[in-house]
Structures are given as structure tokens and as C-alpha cells.
């Protein structure tokens, strides 16, 4: 028999502090929910919009009503593509977490653009690269003191970058081409690998989650342009698109004690769709 140390708590996030960008809806809200349900003491969600149906406040209200949680959700409005806002955000996070520091940083907010190659304006490339790449770099850089404060050899802090399977394949060309989005996610993947080596010695792991299609505001236009959920599900080896639990489970694993020696990997959460290059594939 092997002695597994603390295996009964290997998948919990008891007492951890987390910041999730783009946490007001979609994948960010799924992960924020999972973090609170796994025991986090503070889950800070950020997005640009504060009020209204899609704003942070409604997300925070929902999160704080989750049954059985001990921690709390807190919302901060910030644009994580803007350098000044990133500094302000990190300052506000510091005020909230205090001497605990920040255990988990999830860089999830992302922008996409779909159009014919000839029609993509320069502004679409700037927006995509600013948020999906430069903003991620700057947020990790400015959060470093807080991440280091919480980290130790046996309990490293965690950075998760939410990328896309589009960072490894060429998903859409032609009428609804997503070339710069795809290139930005390839850059985000390599940013994550660089961070793993740069920050590993400071006891911070950096990993990449690459989702396939999950119904969300960001994905809905592309999903409908490609024939809708039912049609895309038929193309997926698992015969469905992603569901909240699929991303939640992987994010919790990578941030839990069980994931503390995993550094610099990319985990695709796509049902295997990225591998499907057969004649019938449209992905
Ligand atoms: N859903 C999919 O099928 C899919 C597939 C592959 C990869 N992904 C990736 O998963 C991540 C989340 O996507 P999602 O589908 O969950 O999208 P979503 O439902 O549209 O949510 C995007 C979130 O990011 C926030 N956001 C957007 N721009 C921001 C900015 N400049 N600063 C701060 N927050 C910002 C949004 O709030 P505000 O608009 O209020 O700022 C919202 O909270 C993205 O990185 C995306 O590329 C998604």
C-alpha cells in the first residue's frame, strides 16, 4: 500500500482566494461557481459591465446564494485589456485578500471576431490581441506579488489561461473566418508555457485550458453560423457540446492539491473534437 498524504482533501480548494476574469457569465461564471462550491473563501469576479442582466452584480448575487458555501463572491468592474484598469483591479484585489494573497488567477476574459479575411478591420485585431494576449501578460505580471504571497513549495499558487482549441488548429476560414482569434490563442498558449518556466521557481504553476464549443454569448454567433448546437453536436466524438461541469471539473483539478505538480500543460476540453479531421468534420 502507498501512503498518499492528505488524499481526502486532494480535490478541495478550502480557504483559497481566486480572481476570475470574465466571471459575469459563460465559462468564467461556471468556474467561479465551482471554486466557491469547492471551498474558496473569496472568489473575485471581474468584467466590464457592473449592472444589468449580463453584469457582474447579478453574477455575484447568484454566486452568494449558492447553497452550502462558506466563502463569498465579490465583483469588481474592470477592463482587463487596459493597463491602468489592470493596476487598479490588482490594488482592489489586494485590499480584499490582505495578507492571504491570491492563490488562483484565472485569465478567462476573451474577445473573438469572425468575418471574411478581407473584411476584418485593424480594430478587430487590436481588440483581440489586447485582451487575449497582452492583457493576460500584464494581469499576471501585476498580480505576481499577490500570487507569491500565497505560494509555497507544497502549495503553489495557480495561473490558468483559458485559451481555445483554435490555438492549435485552423478552425474557421472563409465567410466566418477567425484567423486573428486563432493566432491570439496560439500566442496565449505559448505565453502560458513561458509563464510555467518563469514562475515555477516562485512556486506558481501556469496551465492552459483549451475549450471546444460551449454555448455562451461569445460562441453563439459562430455556433449558429455553423448550423447550430444539434448539428455541431453530431460532429463531436462525444455527440454533444461542452457543459458547465466539463470546464468546472478541469479548473478545480488544476487549482487543487491534486494538480500542484502539473505545470505548463494545455488541457483540451472539447470531447476530442479537435482531433476529428475526417471528411465530415466542420470543426
Ligand atoms: N464558449 C466557447 O465555445 C469557447 C470556446 C473556446 C474558448 N473560449 C474562451 O473562453 C473564454 C470565455 O468565453 P465565454 O464563451 O465564456 O464568453 P462570454 O460568455 O461572452 O463571457 C465573456 C466574459 O468576459 C468578459 N469580458 C469581455 N471583455 C472583457 C474585458 N475587456 N475586460 C474584462 N472582462 C471582459 C465579459 O463581460 P463584459 O462584456 O461585461 O466585459 C464576460 O464576463 C474566452 O477566453 C474564450 O475565448 C470559449
Image (cartoon, grey):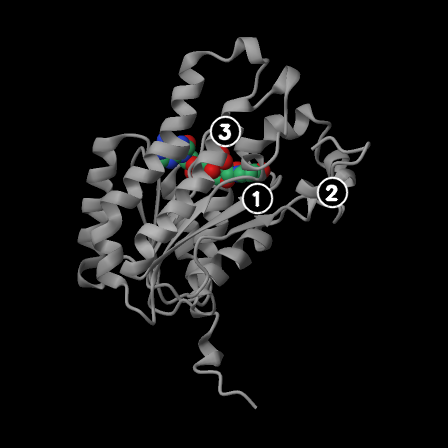
Q: Residue at the location (62% across, 27% down)?
A: 222
Disc 1: which residue: 211
Disc 2: which residue: 236
- Cα separation between marks 1 and 2: 13 Å
Please tell me in which quadrant of the rendered image residue 257 appears: bottom left
In the rendered structure, which disc, 3 or 1, sits on the residue that comes first in sequence? 3
Please tell me in which quadrant of the rendered image residue 66 appears: bottom left
Disc 3: which residue: 183
- Cα separation between marks 2 and 3: 23 Å
Q: Nearer the viewer, mark 2 or mark 3?
A: 3
Do the residues bearing badges 1 and 2 touch, measured as CB atoms within 8 Å? no
Mark 3 Cα within 10 Å, few/some/many (few <14, many 20+)? Answer: many
In the rendered structure, which disc, 2 or 3, sits on the residue that comes first in sequence? 3
Mark 1 Cα within 10 Å, few/some/many (few <14, many 20+)? Answer: many
Regarding residue 122, the answer to whether it shows in the image is: yes
Q: Quadrant of the N terminus?
A: bottom right
Q: Is mark 1 within 8 Å of ligand 1?
A: yes
Amino acid at each position: 500500500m502507498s501512503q498518499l498524504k492528505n488524499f481526502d482533501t486532494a480535490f478541495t480548494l478550502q480557504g483559497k482566494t481566486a480572481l476570475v476574469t470574465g466571471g459575469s457569465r459563460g465559462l468564467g461564471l461556471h468556474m467561479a461557481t465551482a471554486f466557491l462550491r469547492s471551498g474558496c473563501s473569496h472568489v473575485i469576479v471581474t468584467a466590464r459591465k457592473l449592472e444589468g442582466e449580463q453584469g457582474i452584480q447579478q453574477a455575484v448575487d447568484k454566486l452568494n446564494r449558492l447553497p452550502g458555501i462558506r466563502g463569498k463572491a465579490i465583483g469588481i468592474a474592470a477592463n482587463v485589456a487596459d493597463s491602468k484598469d489592470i493596476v487598479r483591479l490588482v490594488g482592489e484585489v489586494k485590499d480584499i485578500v490582505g495578507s492571504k494573497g491570491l492563490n488562483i488567477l484565472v485569465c478567462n476574459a476573451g474577445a473573438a471576431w469572425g468575418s471574411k479575411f478581407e473584411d476584418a478591420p485593424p480594430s478587430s485585431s487590436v481588440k483581440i490581441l489586447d485582451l487575449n494576449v497582452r492583457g493576460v501578460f500584464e494581469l499576471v505580471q501585476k498580480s505576481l506579488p499577490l500570487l507569491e504571497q500565497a505560494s509555497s513549495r507544497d502549495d503553489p499558487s495557480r495561473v490558468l489561461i483559458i485559451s481555445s482549441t483554435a490555438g492549435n488548429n485552423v478552425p474557421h476560414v472563409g465567410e466566418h473566418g477567425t484567423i486573428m482569434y486563432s493566432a491570439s490563442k496560439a500566442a496565449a498558449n505559448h505565453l502560458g508555457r513561458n509563464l510555467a518556466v518563469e514562475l515555477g521557481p516562485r512556486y506558481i504553476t501556469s496551465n492552459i485550458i483549451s475549450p471546444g464549443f460551449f454555448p455562451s454569448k461569445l460562441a453563439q454567433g459562430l455556433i449558429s453560423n455553423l448550423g447550430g448546437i444539434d448539428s455541431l453536436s453530431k460532429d463531436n466524438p462525444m455527440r454533444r457540446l461542452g457543459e458547465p461541469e466539463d470546464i468546472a471539473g478541469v479548473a478545480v483539478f488544476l487549482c487543487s492539491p491534486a494538480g500542484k505538480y502539473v505545470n505548463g500543460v494545455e488541457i483540451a476540453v472539447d470531447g476530442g473534437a479537435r482531433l476529428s479531421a475526417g471528411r465530415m468534420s466542420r470543426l
